Image (cartoon, grey):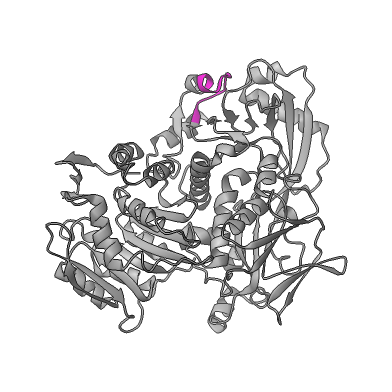
Amino acid sequence: MQFADLEMRNGVPFSPRFDDIYFSRQGGTDETRHVFLGNNNLPERFPTELGQWFTIGETGFGTGLNFITTLHIWRETPRASRLHFISVEKYPVSPTTLRALLLPLREELPEVDEFLAQYHSLVPGWNRLSFSDAELSLFVGDALSGLNDIDGVVDAWYLDGFTPAKNGDLWNPTIYHAMARLSRPGTTVATFTAALPVREGLNAAGFLAGKCPGFGLKRTMCRGHFIGLHGPERPITNKQWWSRPIHALKPGQTVGVLGSGLAAAETAQRLRHRGYAVTLIAPDEPGSAASGNDQGAVYAKPGLEADPATCFYAHALSYRVRLWQSQGQFWPGKACGLVQVTSEKRWQRLAEAVNHPFAQLMQPISQAEASALSGVTLSGPALFFPQGGWLSPSQYCKDQLALIPRIATRADQLTFDATHQQWVVNANGTEIHRCDALVIAAGQHSNQFPQTEHLRLKPVRGQVSQAATPKGSPRTVVCGDSYLTPADDQGHWHFGASFDVGSDHNAVKSEDTLLNRSALAALAPEAAQAIENHTTVERAAVRATTPDYLPMSGPVLIEEALNSSPTNWYRHNNTSPLFLPGLYVLTGLGSKGLASSALCAEQLVCLMTGEPTPMGNMLGSRIHPGRFWRRT
């Protein structure tokens, strides 16, 4: 990732690359208030009702001052609605530089600290920063690529790139038409420049734009609103895109969640935070089945290339560690860092890949450094994840679901009441619950219903070993082909786990105990020797994964589509609803649920409510439940 080459000149940040300043010398926050808030008629347009949101799109994130100032104004009036701020930036300011730049503004903008707590671990593409009342989606990369990938509708635009004459990538007809695709009639736009090509370009794309008084020493600026496209819309041909579910949740509607593990906990918590009445339907206590381990490593293994799985897990892990840094002070676990042992050849390739999706998440370290950091002698060089660590999935699920009512019954039949537009959940022939939307987050059991039996899930049995803390237990999580955690509050550490694809039995096996000990000896010989004569406590559970080892998060396809080839469906039924109304699934987390469940749940909930999604169209298509049908 290439960060901005920012320097200070005359008290304001300056970009030598573009030979321009980041904001006005007359005051950055005052400029934001006048140019962007005032000329988009904000905050008067901000909604206040529960279940509503307002979306701002921005070209040129820069120092983040526009976002922080907007969030500050958003909070001046108590509101139950939610702010979405979507911005694109090719050269982000580094976290260290931005901290030094923004800290002097803390008294004027208390939100600075809250923002800086999450401005780290950036990855190429989408980065989601979640706040109590707002979501920031920052795209790092080419602006047009980001705008074309947005999955949402924008209510107001901030055009804040460097001067048009010096940064043509942000000021051209393709950018304006991308904005038009994301706008609705009445969407407003404001920018500091009043250049004629900008006004003409906006007008040609369907905006009505004109001059108005500028800020400070600048006499005029430009503002306008979207009135509609002139002629046919320019198509964006991308076969990865999925249409949005047409039955979005409305305020006050009810949601049922089948399951009690990580997928269910993350989804239910987010729905409840947005004001929906959520009911859990599961025979198992929260955090007792596949999510029932006392310790789990928060990590993902980077591939050598930027393949779909590597890109997805980089985004998911970065989101998890940002949440952990800003909201996880009460989470059951410890952000003690994570050392991932790897081969010399693989270590060398990843160390040289400065633009790798994981580049800002990890640091290549030598075998000696890895051993010193972890406190145990390790078998090879490693990748150090300073923001990583371990969580207790069992306790985490219990905490997240503590306020969610639960029906302790296993559902065995789902029917849709078309008259009332509700899902009816049955058990043993008896109705046990009705809801306006239903999320199936039941792990390996998620495809047990006729509506979901097409989902390609594979059971994966895993057995983990627990030992009393011996001398020389690690200070960080250590992982390679297996993992080892530091001691928890009860004085235990865990190692393993086996990975038995296709097995759906959760009985403990003595051969897996030996397998875990053997893997530990290969990873950290001294740690294995320390417990050589110790008896371990074993636990086995069955997780669900998919053929491409990526999760499933999204709506469920209708039977008519499944019985048709994608080619025929899109040729003859491209205006028909593709998904069952109000039925969604989140499953297939496999062994990386602690890393991926939060982002998958955020994606799912935004699809349910109609909000802008956290990962855009391209990455969202990679975890869509219908992807295997589409690939045929």
Residue pictured at 58% horizontal, 56% vertical: 273
Residue lying farthest front? 77
Give x and y (percent) for residue 406: 75, 56
Write the start and end of the magenta stretch as one range: 371-383
Q: Quadrant of residue 163?
A: bottom left
Q: Quadrant of the C terminus?
A: bottom right
Question: Farthest residue toward the right?
Answer: 428
Left or right: residue 51 compared with residue 503? left
* Left or right: residue 599 compared with residue 213: right
Q: Position of residue 106 (x, y in %)?
A: 34, 41
- Residue 529 drawn above or below residue 453: above
- Residue 170: name its quadrant: bottom left
Is 623 on the left or on the right of 237, as rendered?
right
* Residue displayed at 54% across by 78% down: 570
Seen from the viewer's position, the closer of residues 299 and 70 is: 70
Question: Is 45 in the magenta?
Answer: no
Residue positioned 65% across, 44% down in the render:
591
